[in-house]
Amino acid sequence: MECLIGIQGKYFVLVACDTVSVRSIVSIKQDIDKMHKLHYNLLMLAVGKSGDTILFAKYMRNGYVSSPHAAANFTRTNLADYLRRFTPYMVNLLLAGYDKDEGPALYFMDYLASLNKVPFGAHCYGSLITVSILGIYYREKITLDEANKL
């Protein structure tokens, strides 16, 4: 069961994902990496069609230094541009990052290029139950240990 999870604390962003690539009832691969390091302070978690996630992650590794806010808007713009072409990327994303001025940030994006800054988020089948659990137990001043347990 595919799932991406992200939790933002006061001084951190904690993310987790599985390593399974599934399409319908077929398990395609058991050891896929869904975390893509964009920069030393930015991490993108991508899930969707296998080829789309890999190609989009490679495209987003542009080498520019930017804040999580700027990277999220750049990513959203690219998803929206490709959505209007013949070859849209069918990817759902969580973008986690830390900036010295802004602090930690977690952004939620879907394949339709909607962008939201969220305190917690999840994608795919696992999100159906994960979001409700996080909605109940998440606190604004959650510690790293509490987030790990959650």
Image (tube, rainbow, N blue to C red):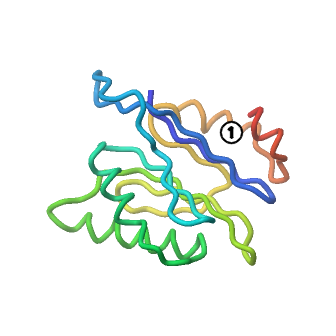
Pick the residue in front: 40 or 111. Answer: 40
Residue 30 is situated, as x and y percent measured from the top left of the image, at 40, 27
- Quadrant in which the N terminus appears: top left
Residue 106 in percent (x, y) is at: 62, 58
Q: x, y (%) of residue 99?
A: 69, 72
Q: Which residue is mark 1?
A: 134
Question: Which quadrant: the C terminus?
Answer: top right
Total number of numbered discs in the rendering: 1
Residue 33 horizontal side relative to residue 78, left or right: right
Q: Residue at x 41, y 37 (%)?
A: 32
Question: In the image, what residue occupies the spot 55% across and 43% down?
Answer: 122
Task: Check the image and report above or below for 51 versus 137.
Answer: below
Residue 72 at x, y percent in the picture? 51, 68
Helix, strand or loop under label 1: helix
How dense is the environment of label 1, judged by Cα within 10 Å: few (below 14), some, or many (20 and up)? many
- The foreground one among 127 and 132 is 127
